[in-house]
Image (cartoon, grey):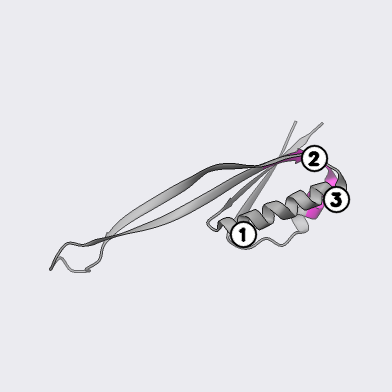
Amino acid sequence: MQKARIKLTSTDSEKLEAVCNDIIDISKKLGTAITGPIPFPTKKLKVTTRRAPNGAGRESYETWELRLHKRVIDMQADPKALHLIMKTTVPKEVNIEMEIKE
């Protein structure tokens, strides 16, 4: 049986969980086997910049951080379920990748 692997990435964890819950609801309605969502470690990207644009004055720095949340869902590759997942509305903060594996 073929499996579909759905990788979800987002900077907003609440919207990511909402999309995961939508996918789980679709699979439960159709009765397809599902594994996940499996949370991956949050990737933290840090950037340090100077506050003052010129070099004068006291040296003070700001640190900016971007957090990337990831989830993976494995499910049976049912064409009807995959079609419904592709039709769901997804916020622009959430990125989805789908793969079919054997």
Q: Is residue 7 magenta?
A: no
In the rendered structure, which amino acid carries the disc numbered 3? Lys
Alpha-carbon span between mark 2 and mark 3: 15 Å
Question: Which amino acid type is shown beneath numbered disc 2?
Answer: Ala
- Image location of residue 10, percent across then percent down: 56, 54
Q: Is residue 77 magenta?
A: yes
Residue 59 position, x and y percent, is 17, 62
Q: Is residue 14 above or below residue 74?
A: below
Quadrant for the N terminus, please: top right
Q: Residue 92: which quarter of the image? A: bottom right
Which numbered disc covers residue 15? 1
Q: Can you identify the residue that label 3 sits on? A: 29
- Gap in Å between the C-alphas at discs 3 and 1? 21 Å
- What residue type is disc 1 on? Lys
Of the two numbered discs 2 and 3 on the same chain, state the one appearing first in sequence.
3
* Residue drawn at x 55%, y 58% as measured from the top left: 12
Name the residue carrying label 2. Answer: 77
Of labels 1 and 2, earlier in sequence is 1
Residue range of the region highlighted in magenta in the rendering: 73-84
The location of residue 81, given as percent across then percent down, is 82, 48
Residue 48 vs residue 96: left or right? left
Q: Secondary structure at mark 1?
A: helix
N-terminal of the pair, mark 3 or mark 1, is 1
